[in-house]
Image (cartoon, helix red, strand yellow):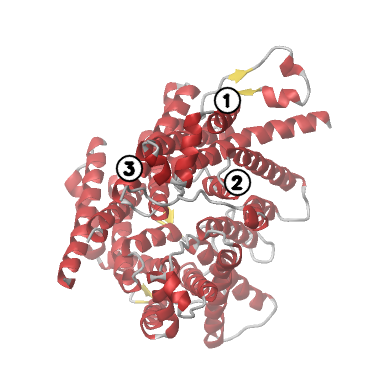
Amino acid sequence: MKDKKILRVILIYFLSILFAFLVISIIVSIFGYNVIKVLKTLLTTSFKTTFGFQETIKKTIPLIFTTYAYTIPFMIKFFNIGGWGQMLFGGTITAVVGLTLPYLGINFPSYIMIPLLIVTGILAGGFFGLIAGFLAAKFDINPIISTIMLNFVAVQFLNFIATNPIYRDPFEGHPITLPLPKSGTLGFIYGVPVSIIFAIISIIFVYVLIKKTKLGYEITAIGHNLDAAQKFGINFQKTILTTFFIAGALAGLGGTFEVINIHKKLIEGFAQTSGAQYGIFGVLTGLIVAGDPVGVPIAAFLMSVLLVGADALQRTMQIPVEMVFLSQALIVLFIVTFRERFLRRT
Amino acid sequence: MLSFINSFISQTITYAVVYTLTSLGIVISGRAGIFNVAAEGIMLASASIGFIVSFLTQNAILGFIAGMIMGGIFGFILAYIHESFKVNQFILGISLVILGTGLSDLMYKLIIGVKLTAPRAPKTPLIKIPFISEIPIIQAFLNQDVIVYFLYFVILFAWWFYYRTKIGLETRAIGENPKAADVVGVNVVKRRYLSTIIGSMLIGISGAYLPIVITGTYMPDISAGRGFMAVGIAIFASWKPQRAILGGFLFAAIEVIAFRLQVISQNIPYQFFLMLPFISVLIIMMIFKKQIEYPASVGKPYSRE
């Protein structure tokens, strides 16, 4: 029985990807591109060169964080579209702390600075997630609305910090802050960001949280049957708040690493890649894994493969990166449709 | 002072087209039981195709028609996947938002391409009523483009349809109790398709209005969250058309006020004014918490079993 279900799941993913690539192939050939070459570039760029693989990992790390931000509230049937805003807010506050300390003449060594910035990112992102959780728990406001409104608030807040006279780089026309002090930044090992260590820790953390703790058990129970869970004394409102805090904290942590490891300063639009922002890609990846935190790292990696392929397509064949974004959206649309068709009816 | 009031009302009405048409579109499909969370994606896709068509043909009206058709296509997809495959409306809506976002930039880049100077949309025809269009204040309402008049028409028609016709009453009943409506012989599924497609067409027109009238040119992410704000308006309006219309005008006014304060204000950084519309949505939804009612069947697929 279980084997049959796994077979069906594989079939669903396979069919969805096939259908999406079929649609893309048609669009691409209408505009006169070589379909075989497009598909080959899209799927193999990550594995052909070391640089391609490093780029893929670089995109996978933030994507893991934003996908968790979507997935954990989704386990109790809430939609957190605010991974982007939580990421921006976490990164922004991290930059504020990282730049204010040297501005005040306080210089910590990196073994204090780095943990401090990481905790800052976790708390800031968590706070931003908690706002949406609070609005959902106390005022019954659907997080789809509140998280998106908060995304735009975070965008403006980032802009405010990056153009603030204390922080901004006076020689830049674009909203960009001064670089963070050396003690507050992370480096690369073999071209891979050091933050991968923290990404792996987060993967283990989420796995243990969901599978081995009481909170994880409560989350699963609410996801299966809210009424029954409440009858057994699980506090629903508290669980909403906790899940949104954890989701926001993870997204904020992702933002921190983008700031301290990738850019080493705060840049407007730092959470952007391949034609869209990590929040949207996180939602897409989250829709693919459908509330199963175990699948998140794998799905995030595969999405990044497509993103790196998308960048290569734009460089070598002048195909807009949005083509791949569209194909990912189609994959997801087919997956959610086929999933209902083949799984729920049994 | 008079000219200030005039220009304020006039600008508010321009933005009200976007908010009101979109939230009315969401209300119309919600009344039949389909919660259209995809408004943002529909607006973006329609904005892109509307601008492309109006720019290539140099005819604004054709652009609006193209946007409307794009909206209709999205509405059909939404209704079809929801009714035939019973996919959760929120998951479906979010997927369609992302699809519309990707589609909008892609179409623009493939068809128009990257230009050094931003291409401008052709002028939308204005309607001027002789004599009446000269009176202050009233002038702000009537000295407007065709789509504003279309909005006035839609408002009157929606009121008449839902409160003065039998079909309107039946459609409202579908949202409350589809089974009972089915028993008395209303074709629930057909009505849901129609309502969603018509509602999405209105959203499509409002999407096309953004690049053709408000900004005059296309840019990525042009709707900037207004689609989701309209969803918020539809919710706190409890899916009542008249309240959605009021909400649309209210948010248009908030956006115009935020825009003007940002120019005048010296001490407060302008970014905080740009946050204002988004924060207002949340505050208003908190205030109206007690009064919000959902049509009983909204969000659930209908099956006869």
Instruction: Judge from the rendering whether residue B272 lies leftward or rightward of residue B191; answer left or right.
Output: right
Q: Residue furthest top?
A: B130
Residue contact between numbered discs 3 and 1, judged by CB atoms under 8 Å: no
Identify which residue, A48 or B68, lies in the foreground. B68
Task: Decide if residue B114 is in sight here.
Answer: no
Q: Chain of mark 2?
A: B
Instruction: Describe the element under mark 1 as helix, strand or loop.
Output: helix
Q: x%, y% of residue B54?
A: 46, 26
Identify which residue, A296 or B261, lies in the foreground. A296
Identify which residue, B39 or B293, lies in the foreground. B293
Instruction: Write the residue at 37% across / 44% down.
Output: B78
Residue A189: image quadrant is: bottom left
Instruction: Judge from the rendering whether residue B119 lies leftward or rightward of residue A28; answer left or right.
Output: right
User: Mark 3 vs mark 1: same chain?
Assistant: yes
Q: Give whichever of discs 2 and 1 has the lower sequence position.
A: 1
Which of the labelled discs sits on residue B153, or is there none? 1
Identify which residue, A196 or B195, lies in the foreground. B195
Q: x%, y% of residue A72?
A: 43, 70
Write down the residue under mark 3.
Answer: B80
